[in-house]
Amino acid sequence: MIADLFRRLQKADFDPTTDEIADAMWLCRHLPANLLVGSEDSNAEPQPAQIDTRRRREPAPILADDIGAAEQLTAWAPQTAVELAEERAPADDPIVILHRDLDRVDGSRRAIGFRVPGVAALPEARDLGLAMRPLSRPLGRSRTLILNEEETVRRLFEDKILAPALVPDRGRWANLVLVVDTSPTMAIWDQTVKELRRLFERQGGFRDVRTWRLDPSTTPISLRPSLRSNEAISARSLRELHDPAGHRMIVVVSDCVHKAWSDGAVAEALEYWATRGSVAVLHVFPPRLWPRSAVGLPTRHLSATSLVVSNISLRLDPPQPRAEPRALPLPILSLDRVSFSNWAKIVAGQVSIAVAGIDIAQLRPSPPVSTGAASQDEDDWDAESAEAWVNMT
């Protein structure tokens, strides 16, 4: 039977693949008989497709054999299949609406709309969420007191004491701020940033998750709340992200290729936040491309000595030479489970874990080389030394 079907299709100048044949046979099993071409009731008046209310409550996509059938079905379902698919899609689920038009002998066409989920920008979102579990546990003894409503009411009615009952807050200890680089090269990462924010919100390890925009193209760099760049919001001070209680974590999402990452403009903001809270840079590039950005490929490791309240409490390995200024460690994260897991454990105070990082001073331009008088050795260069230097270069 299948071989005969292939021959009939080839005579009609239609050469389908095996997958297309399988899809067509599956579709024929689920379509009403009066809508199938060549059925005994093909001349009868088409009726709306029967809906199985036990499995779904919404109308199934509409398939019309010809123009007359489509006009008769319009009164029953004025919406097209594409419109129905758009309504069924969740607001935060990227979709692609596809359809295939088949030309008929009489010039009419038929099409069926269906919903195809878009490719996730974070394919390992579930693993990333599991990797951040250490941040979901209450950490240490909280200094913040909250009102115990039940105990307050009990005191009032049983002990006749009108006084609030305060207890230590055992909830989530940290607030998260996503600072998103809005330079032109970050436009292709918009979907990744949205899914990343959704991941942090649904992970449940933070009291609050907020998004700020960092524009490195201005002088000085500007910081604005919200993720929508079309909003007319005035620039804010870097101090607005500082939490005196030490409960704020800042994650800067960037590709680190804008010139502000190498001329010290971004380093100034990172230094301010890192001395007052926990700061990390989430690099959207895979590690193999990091050398093409300002941070380069980190060659040092960061570890914690206790609960990380600020980057000052991080330990840099190998340590900074005593002759050089004190280093300010900055973790560099990648979009993978191991990097997220190690960062979460370090922030939680686990001392046996290390994560890749750099000294923030690396993001500042190198000091200019002294242009004093040439040394005697340089003046005494002979032809043989010059020739050897040319051969080396």
Image (cartoon, grey):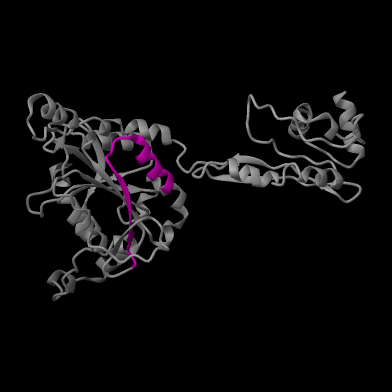
Q: Position of residue 12 (x, y in %)?
A: 91, 40
Q: Is residue 153 above or below residue 105?
A: above
Name which residue lies at 10% across and 54% down. Answer: 324
Front residue of 5/158: it is: 158
Query: Does residue 198 show up magenta in the picture?
Result: yes
Magenta-drawn stretch contains 252: no
**35 w.r.t. 71: above or below:** above
- Report the magenta residues as a range: 194-217
In x, y percent, where is residue 352?
19, 30
Q: How many marks?
A: 0
Residue under the image location 78 percent in, 47 percent down = 101
Give me the residue at 15% from left, 28% from top: 151
Who is closer to the viewer here, 240 or 384?
Answer: 240
Question: Does residue 6 lie above or below 227 as drawn?
Answer: above
Q: Position of residue 290 (x, y in %)?
A: 36, 50
**Relative to residue 317, is residue 351 depicted above or below?**
above
Q: Residue 383, percent across and down? A: 26, 71
Is 56 situated left or right of 380 in this image? right
The residue sitting at 77% across, 46% down in the picture is 74
Q: Nearer the viewer, residue 342 or 130?
A: 130
Q: Quadrant of residue 132?
A: top left
Extreme-bottom residue of the structure = 373
Q: In the displayed structure, does residue 51 sit left or right of residue 66? A: left
Q: Quadrant of the N terminus?
A: top right
**Residue 254 in the figure: left or right of residue 247:** right
Quadrant where the C terminus sits is bottom left
Task: Give the image quarter of residue 309.
Answer: top left
